[in-house]
Image (spheres, grey):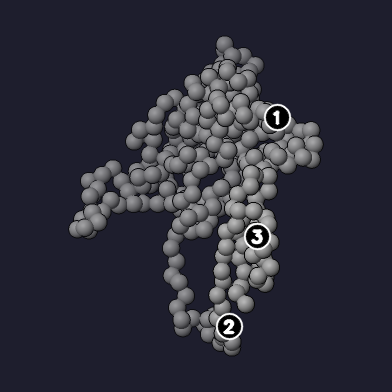
Amino acid sequence: MHCWCRTFAVLELVHEMNLNIPIHTSVMMNTHNEHAIEKLKEYGITRIVVGREMTLSELSLFRERTGIEVEYFMHGDMCMSESGQCIHSGVVFGQSGNRGRCLKPCRWPYQLIDEQSGEVLDSDGPGPYKLALKDMCMYRSIPQLIQAGVFSFKIEGRMRPAPFVRRIVSTYRKAIDAYLADPAGYQVDEEGWKSLYENRARDFTTTFAFGKTTKKDIGFDGKREPRFFSDAVKEAGFQDDVLKQEPDIQKENAPHRTLSVRTGTIESAKAAIRQWCRCRLCRRRGLPPEPSVVTGRLR
């Protein structure tokens, strides 16, 4: 059993509860430099999950300098933004990618249009799927992953059907065991590669593992881009039968005004509260004193 955390709040809670379990960081903690790793080790972190954007040479350097266990992605969907840091879906649709509900706007077709004239500027471009990275597949690079110091391999399986995940995991497990059993005599199992390739969702790439990405790592034409439920649908009109069944509004809310006051001390906040009813004091636990906010309805 281990604790998998994505915020320092969880780390504080683990220490407050005196839990004696291994602590690993999520990729969403965006750990990508030596200083961050050393700070995390002070909290008892024993393993970090690094972003897909990290090269194997960088990973090897972190491992050598800090001694921490490193978990690295080896297969699955790629994020156009920094892994775990994209807020596009959350801002536009209210469906946060950091909560596993990403609507994948980076997987949609786009056009470059002149704002003034409306002219399409990329009609001769390679394709409309400009942000759609191909899927990561490190199957043919397992020796390089292990030699770089990867301690644990991460396969993206969120929202994937069980048979899909089972086939990928078993294929990689067999290959990893074969390399560990005989590093000098290891050869890529072409049958395993064929199984992965013929059942792929998108085309494959090693993306950032061996250096910067280029346009060859993007599936511009979108031919292998899966279709998601996030396509636009027609909204219900005012004459929709469901809306007709809704009762009319019987009573309007009484008009009122709300006043918010920012205070610098608890004493000032208490004084403000005594002047109003239904007031609320907001302070963040565990942080240095800062101006507090009191809100309430005017009498």
Q: Spot the residue most to the top.
A: 184
The amino acid marked with disc number 2 is Ala
Can the viewer see residue 264? yes
- Please state if 114 lies on the left or on the right of 15 as rendered: left
Q: How far, Cα to Cα, is label 3 from label 1?
A: 38 Å
Identify the residue at horizontal 28%, vertical 42% (top origin).
Answer: 126
Q: Is residue 278 above or below residue 2?
A: below
Identify the residue at horizontal 34%, vertical 36% (top origin).
Answer: 215
Name the residue beneath numbered marker 1: 44
Q: Residues within 10 Å of mark 2 (few under 14, many from 20)?
A: few
| Label 2: element kind | loop
The amino acid marked with disc number 3 is Ala
Q: Where's the C terminus, which quadrant?
A: bottom right
The amino acid marked with disc number 1 is Gly
Q: Is residue 3 above or below residue 177?
A: below
Identify the residue at horizontal 23%, vertical 54% (top origin).
Answer: 114
Name the residue beneath numbered marker 3: 269
Identify the residue at horizontal 45%, vertical 66% (top origin).
Answer: 233
Name the residue beneath numbered marker 2: 254
Q: Based on the displayed image, in which of its 4 quarters is residue 295 positioned?
A: bottom right
Can the viewer see residue 78? no
Q: How far, Cα to Cα, is label 2 from label 3?
A: 27 Å
N-term mark: 3 or 1: 1
| Label 3: element kind | helix
N-term mark: 2 or 1: 1
Nearest the eye: 130 or 41: 41
- Where's residue 46, x and y in %? 68, 28
Tag nearer the camera, 2 or 1: 2
